[in-house]
Image: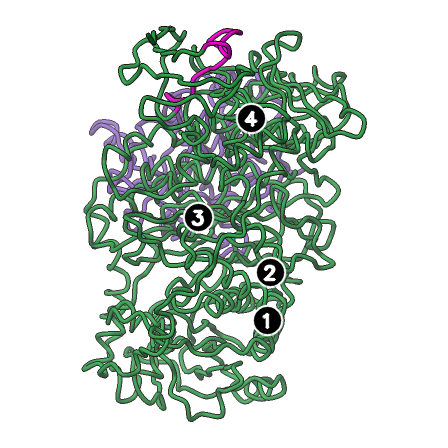
Chain colours: A purple, B green
Amino acid sequence: MAPRIGVVLFPGTNCEHDAVHAVERLGGDAELVWHGATSLGAYDGLILPGGFAHGDYLRPGAIARFSPVMEAVAGYAAAGGPVVGICNGFQVLTEAGLLPGALQKNRGLRFLCTTVTIRVESGRTSLTDGVEVGTELSIPINHFEGNYTCDADTLAELRGEDRVVLRYVDNPNGSVDDIAGVCNAGRNVVGLMPHPERAVDALLGSLDGTVLLGALLRSAGATTPAT
Amino acid sequence: MRTTLQMQLPMPLVEPHRRVIACDSLGPDAGQRSRPVTVQAPGDESGPYTIRAMDPTGHAQADLVTETGVPLHRALGLTDDERDEVVGILGRSPNHLELALFAVMWSEHCSYKSSRVHLKRLPTEAPHVLVGPGENAGVIDAGDGIAVAIRIESHNHPSAIEPYQGAATGVGGILRDIFTMGARPIAVMDPLFFGDPTEARQQWLIEGVVAGISGYGNSVGVPTIGGELTFDPCYAQNPLVNVLCMGVLPTERLVLGQASGPGNLAVLLGSATGRDGIGGVSVLASAGFGGGDEAEEAAKRPSVQVGDPYEEKRLIEACLELLDAKLVVGIQDLGGAGLVCATSETAARGGVGMDVDVSAVPRREPGMADYEVMTSESQERMLAIVTPADLPRVQELCAKWEVRAAVVGRVTEAPDGAPGRLRILDGFDGPVLGDVPAVALSEDAPLYHRPLARPADQDARLADDPGALPAPRDCGQDLLAMLADPTWVYRQYDHQLFLNTVEGPGGDSAVLRLAAPGLPESERGLALTTDSNPTWCALDPRAGTAATVAEAALNLACSGATPKAVVNCLNFGNPEHPEVMWQLSEAIDGMSEACLALGLPVIGGNVSLYNESFGRDIDPTPVIGGLGVIDHLAARPPGVTLVEGGTLVLLDGSGTSTSGGTRPSLAGSRWAVQLRNHRNGTLPPLDLVGHGRLVDLVAALVAEGVAGGDTLVDGIHDVSGGGIGVALAELAVRSDIGVQVAGVADHHELFTEAPSRVVVCTTRSAELLERAADAGVGFRVLGTAGGRRIVIDALVDLDLDEVAAGWRTRLPDLLDGLAPAAN
């Protein structure tokens, strides 16, 4: 059976249809989950897509972490369910404490929409399971606050535990240690600033996003946590 | 002995409405008083104002004057004749609220009173046109049960004094025009015009405008897929910020902004109404700038609206859900002239009247006067007409999206044989504050046949040809000076959202898949471009505008699209200058000629006048938005690129190309204007018939590859600003492949911007030339692609990396040192 992915929709999210489209294109089923939901359906995985949840007011993710759905998301993550936060979704996951660190404004203080090369640094997460370490992927970025930062201890921990999932080959935004994506200690929650859902169609310029989202669907197919 | 009666007004008055004083507040017997009345508002230090003679009816406004002696209607922007016309329509003198309604609705910005007589000459019909000009957006049938809505607007004056918010609200406003039609906005384009980018003030404007478009557009979630960036000193005090938006919808969901069904309710959706943007259309958009005076600009700043993209995003989703659920009878955005415009236009279009309860309008601040509530241009608001039975579901759906919904009006029956009335009430059963025929506001605005005059120096300018200028010592250095990569601008815009962007900003035209949630499946694609040529239009507005339309069509063809329709944004100077009206009239004739010849209907437009400062008008700047349809989009179009070893072929549709003999004109070229500051001469001719042949050929050649088949075209670029020289250099830097070209005689031929030409890179040149010959299109082999140098025999020999570095760093070098604009 095709893995069933819940795509969490906050008011102000804008990449939800793109995430649904990408999942479906890769053979999964996808369903939108309203931010007001207090429980989740039987999903094999969750995506927190990009956009500007609650207008990014105060700071990206700062209000979204209080949306009712986030408790259910935390429970789902604690049960080992695959959770991927893309761009704004990554910001929400850090604000919610499901991932370490924070995303600050880009070096240069400008919004950046461009395609970058990222390198897979760990093949043992829900987004990179089975992907060879060192694989380089051409994936779009689209953010103002994508400059990943964390304290030195956290950075050492991330490195020591193989939790830096993706790095920029040519750092576009000033992220510490060129970090483009990280995972939690359980390796089931992954956040990344690049948009793999924007790279699933050769007509649009790149198919490299299918490497990551394909891995997510494999991870999702392999685990169905209790909800 | 004359005595003065002192009266206190209940609230402070705010510039520029300090002079709008409630006559009614003076009491019912005001008309009988023969002595002057002085009114003073609390906290208003510039008063008191003296009302001199009163009309016997007690409602006359011409009699209400400020201390400086300005009659109220003039202070609001109406002429004496217009005031008389209002009196004729009403059969009595208007009260202050009614006068304020007429002032905003009859402003140049809302009524097109100077341009309408000319706009009628544009061709607007074609079988695929579903909605032409006059509605919120033009709509065409794209096939497969999908319609495409498109509109372009200016937000020039707001951006001149508050660049971030001016540009941001320009984006917000145009999006509402599109989803008003039932369409989901899927793309925005922004043609921008500034003064010399090396000047600090221009850098501040550029930075702010780009940040505003980025900040609003990215957050609201509509990709910005292209535009233009033009620098010329004529825009130094009056930059132009135009915004084009395109949306898509299932054809059967098409809705028009009209009210119907007496008893139905008008529900105001979205933001609360505040004092921002009061008089924007009349104070800002329909008058020129005195010339950068800081105090004057500061005084106008409150007339600029403030945008909230998050509110707009929720409003879009809520409105599209309301339309999907068939819960609205009609819907209209609130833009220029706010609530008065939305209520009077929907009523007039539906042939009905409307009662508006001004007290029911949610407000951002206390103490707002009725005329402020009715004319405020607060952003992110829509007016939906719904049946009473559907109201609970409408409110429920809006609550889900956290969108405010307030019943502010009721549709009323038009009296027998008479137009419907727009009545402004204080409570539906309360006193009537104003009562006017709805149609009078929206459709009875005066029409002006303003005087036209060909500029006295026109012949002298045409005769002063730049061909006589000395040849450049080094064509290569001149070529370098004309190259600038616009990436600095568009990498700040999300241009990829919705997974439709096949070709983003920077090419000849942008290409999108024809897809969106809720649309039927389609193999088709859309191509979109905006084009302008103000230096040409300054020399010859008719020929310049025709050439702009021609360029738009060719840009669409370069992506394999068949051009289907155009919209226009006519940015001109002060219409009270006869030369400006001549430019406008000529431009419209030129557009009309080109559109007729190329079979393109004009399905919408916007006119922005009074673009002047220090009494100097901008160059006439008609911007053309072109929309094309690709029948089968299966592969990426080749775009502006080269392949190693490819043959470079110039396709030339102009009738005169093969005859030779005449020297190619440099008039209006970047080389003459930007590098030599020579702005005169006679433009190169445009052969619209030959141009049509070229457009057809190019569209067919590129479409073959885009459909997934074999292609003769490996790279393509139209020849426009900077001539063949710039076209070749751009092809080279964008592909990182050099060129070897021979047979370009001199700088005239290198830099002329004669229309109807494209450079094609092909690996199958014999077949390409044969196709061109069959199509009756001229051609010439220029050379080959390859190597690491840009060589144009005897004229240019440059290192490709050096050219690429100069091209890439020009804008960042100018603009990256700046402190980014705050929002």
Q: Residue at x 54, y 78 (%)?
A: B687
Front residue (pair B668, B395):
B668
Disc 4/disc 1 C-alpha distance (Å): 45 Å
Q: Is residue B441 above or below residue A195?
A: above
For marks 4 and 2 on the same chain, the one whose residue lies earlier in the sequence? 4
The residue to which callout 3 is attached is: B609
For marks 3 and 4 on the same chain, the one whose residue lies earlier in the sequence? 4
Q: Amino acid at mark 1?
A: Ala
Residues at marks 3 and 1, common chain?
yes
Q: Position of residue A103 (x, y in %)?
A: 32, 32
For marks 1 and 2 on the same chain, the one whose residue lies earlier in the sequence? 2
Disc 1/disc 2 C-alpha distance (Å): 10 Å
Q: Is residue B638 above or below residue B334?
A: below
For marks 3 and 2 on the same chain, the one whose residue lies earlier in the sequence? 3
Query: Magenta segment range?
Result: B17-33
Q: Amino acid at mark 2?
A: Gly
Chain under label 1? B
The residue to which callout 4 is attached is: B339
Q: In the image, is residue B21 part of the stretch drawn in magenta?
A: yes
> What mark, if any, has residue B628 been given in the picture?
2
